[in-house]
Image (cartoon, rainbow, N blue to C red):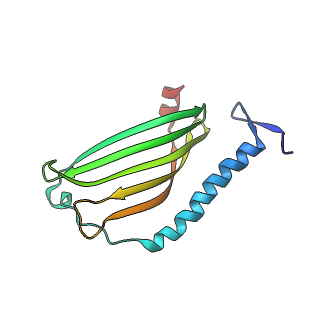
Amino acid sequence: MEGRLSICAGFFVSWTANRHIVLAVLTCCVLAVPSAAQQQSAPEDSEDEKQIGLWLDQGIPIPLAANKSVEVEFHERFDDGALNLYEYFAQVGAAFRPRPWLTIIPIYRYQRYPGNPTVEYESRLQLNLTRLGPSSISARS
């Protein structure tokens, strides 16, 4: 059964490829569970009082195949009238699209808080599951 192919949503998918995807998702889930015990106190956010802030987001998808890509993102957040850098983070992950309406991204995030002396940084493993609605699927086809 090792080399056999199956048809999945019109694509030929090998059993080996399916096992690698399942193994990657399960590994991220298992590694993300212990991180809940290492939670730090939430930083004080000046945006809570002022209700203003500026987010700058840059996302770079790097296609590998029709249903796989590497996702690289950078996010910066400014506060105090967009003068001070409050936090920033970068995240990298592999996106798998087993169905046109489902995207699975195990992702690693490194986040820093230069404006907060109580929390220096955070490292997180996350699992992003995105379900696209019918209008999104027809627009992408």
Residue at (17, 54) in percent of width and height: 51
Please state, as top left, top right, bottom left or bottom right, where the N terminus lies in the image: top right
Q: Is residue 97 left or right of residue 111?
A: right
Percent x, y for residue 97? 59, 39
Q: Is residue 130 visible?
A: yes
Instruction: Find residue 60 and report its image quarter.
Output: top left
**Going 48% across and 32% down the picture, which residue do you hit?**
135
Question: Horizontally, is 18 left or right of 48 in the view?
Answer: right
Q: Work out whether 112 lies above or below 82.
A: below
Q: Is residue 132 left or right of residue 46?
A: right
Residue 115: image location, x then y, percent: 22, 60
In the rendered view, does 113 fall on the left or right side of 97?
left
Numbered-mark total: 0
Name the residue rendered at 76%, 39% in the picture: 14
Task: Please say if 57 is above or below 38.
Answer: above
The quarter of the displayed image where residue 18 is located: top right
| 22 relative to 133, above or below | below
Q: Give the quadrant of the C terminus.
A: top right
Give the camera-side residue of 123 and 5: 123
Q: Which of the two residues, 15 or 85, is positioned nearer the viewer here?
A: 85
What percent of the width, then of the height, locates residue 101?
56, 38
